[in-house]
Image: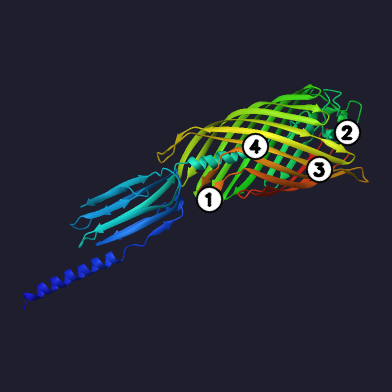
Amino acid sequence: MPDICPKIIAYISRFGAICLFFLAAANPAIGQTYSSCVGVNGAQIEYTGAGTYNDTIIIVALADEDLVTLTKTVTHMGTGNTRIVVTDPSGTEIVNETYNGDHTGSHTYDPSGDMVNAQYDIETDIPLGDDTQVLYVFSCTQNGGTVTQAFLKERMNLLIDREPDRPRMVRKRLGALWGESNTDNENPDSINPQASRLFVSQNNIKTNFSLRDSTYYDNGTKDPELADSEMGCWDLWGETHYTHYSDAGSRSGDFAVGYLGIDCQIHASTIAGVLVQVDWMDDKIGSADSASNGTGWMVGPYATVRLTPNMYFDIRAAWGRSDNDVSIAGVTGDFETERWLVHARLSGNFYVDDYRVTPEASLSYIEEAQDSFMNSAGNNVAAYTASLGRLKFGPEIAKRILTSSGDYAEPFVSLNGVWDFDSTNVTVANSSYSNSLRGMVKAGIIYRKPNGINFRLAVKYDGIGSGSYSAYGGEFWLNIPLY
């Protein structure tokens, strides 16, 4: 009897181990699905003890610039061999190895293009009787390609939209739109003083100043339209813009640009000068766990010409550079860009009695070239050149009403078409950023007092006819003369 007991115990132990083996094999880990690179980053799978385990990892949207790294750690506890087989989303068997000891190794997958339902298949075989532990950890980073592209695209959009307003001839001659005094260019040195202004709109603030405006003196008339300036033909002016924006993919950001210019009225109908601008932008895309920011500058000439009593032409060009930083899921990098732009605008002005029609068309083009750079994960981000061309056109229709107090109220409505004829479509973490042809409607009122103080209040909707872009906003500006 004593000899039989140990044999019975041994058979029972083997039977129990076999049962545990089949139980583990019959209950593999459940497959896991993640929406994107950000979602799979940090995902883990862990197996301990004897069994054959099969698992599947699916990444619903894997972008071209994503880099997926799978790190496997084997903590060996036993005498048998542990076998691991891993197939990456391309169908390539990147691991087919056996281990009889502790082991750590990593494998990185760089997709050749955007992928949908990218799948990893993982098979782990831990031998009977071993308590070996196998841990898989996924990490996913973006090399910064499309995030920096989206950053450049939005900044170019804002640089074009936030063009300086002060150097325009129609802003230096306030009465020109209604054929008031001093609109026939009789005196080249007599420019209608544009007051320093505070411009406030929803998510937008704009201010400017003019040194010429602040140096007008009384030359024998109380009419500011005919006042002279101690500056002679020269005008030193400044202007700033601030914007807060939001978009798809939990995106938000801030943009600011400042202009400093100096010009001279070289002819009765021509003003020419040079301006310097400095801009700053901060951009965050929540769906990509990214943050980008940059500071840049540009410098160039400009001119504004009165072609006819009712037609004005503005043109400018600029060139500059920028320094930028980007962070994506903790991976950082910095890069520089070189950029240039040209902008031209033709404005007409026609009025009959108390009705005014002011059609306008502007053409803008900007290009920004990003230098290649290496991020903190050791991945190279290739050089990239972004460009944006835009045509904006449409009329403004207004009616001027003279009040009993001598003030002018001018309700107006405008409809503009915006066409981006050279624009790069960018997709980041399943959010697409693209604009093509769309419309914008605006309505409001301009109120002007005889002493030169006036304000403008307007509401607008931007995105008519566009399924991917829409914006609502309001505008308010106030003119206060400093003479």
Q: In percent of the image, x 89 and y 25: which residue is there? A: 219
Q: In which quarter of the image is the N terminus?
A: bottom left
The amino acid on which the numbered mark 3 sits, given as a three-letter code, is Ile
Q: In this view, does 14 lie above or below 421?
A: below
Residue hosting label 3 = 397
**Distance from the alpha carbon under mark 1 to that under mark 2:** 52 Å
Q: Which of marks 3 and 1 is nearer the N terminus?
A: 1
Q: Earlier in the sequence, mark 4 or mark 3?
A: 4
Q: Check disc 3 and report its element: helix, strand or loop.
A: strand
Q: Which of marks 3 and 2 is nearer the N terminus?
A: 2
Which residue is painted at 41% across and 42% down in the image?
112
* Position of residue 47 measured from the top left corner of the image (x, y, whole percent): 30, 59
CA distance separating discs 3 and 2: 18 Å
Residue to which mark 1 is pinned: 286
**Circle nearer the N terminus (1, 4):** 1
How many C-alpha atoms fall within 10 Å of the one at disc 3: few (<14), some, or many (≥20)? some
Residue 180 numbered mark, or none: 2
Q: Position of residue 71 (x, y in %)?
A: 33, 49
Up-down: is 290 above or below 307? below
